[in-house]
Image (cartoon, rainbow, N blue to C red):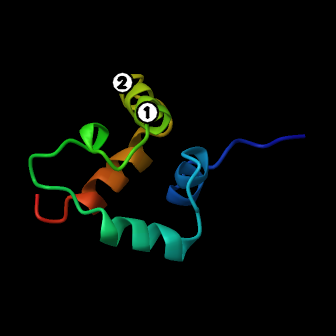
């Protein structure tokens, strides 16, 4: 029997088809810092499918929204 899915950063990266290890996530965040006025979903760091997933989940205020918000904050340290 399957339990509730976990909504955390590692699972978000796996959902996006990215390496979901803690080290890979830290490296991704470090290498992809966004400008203060650059929106997460408009960044060129995503492919079309990743961007669509992030946007749809954000707009639906879905279970992923807190994790996406956390990623947004981590990618905008100067905001």
Give the CA separation, mark 2 to mark 1. Answer: 16 Å
Residue underneath mark 1: 48
How many residues crowd around disc 1 within 10 Å: few (fewer than 14), some, or many (20 or more)? few
**For the residue labelled by badge 1, is the local secondary structure a helix, a strand or a loop?**
helix
The image quadrant that residue 4 belongs to is top right
Q: Which mark is residue 5?
A: none
> Residue 64's spot in the image, x, y percent?
48, 40
Residue with the most extreme bottom position: 23
User: Considering only vertical position in the picture, is 76 above or below 64?
Assistant: below
> Residue 8's spot in the image, x, y percent?
53, 54
Q: Which mark is residue 59?
A: 2
How many residues crowd around disc 2 within 10 Å: few (fewer than 14), some, or many (20 or more)? few
Depth check: give the residue in front, 50 or 72.
Answer: 50
> Residue 65's spot in the image, x, y percent?
41, 39
Looking at the rendered image, the quarter that the N terminus falls into is: top right
> Residue 20's spot in the image, x, y percent?
58, 62
The image quadrant that residue 29 belongs to is bottom left
Residue visible at 33% across and 47% down in the picture: 69
């Amino acid at each position: 029997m399957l339990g509730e899915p976990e909504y955390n950063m590692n699972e978000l990266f796996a959902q996006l088809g990215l390496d979901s290890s803690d080290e890979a996530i830290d490296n991704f965040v470090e290498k992809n810092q966004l400008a203060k006025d650059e929106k997460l979903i408009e960044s060129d760091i995503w492919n079309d499918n990743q961007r669509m997933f992030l946007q749809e989940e954000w707009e639906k205020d879905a279970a992923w929204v807190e994790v996406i918000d956390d990623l947004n904050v981590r990618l905008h340290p100067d905001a």
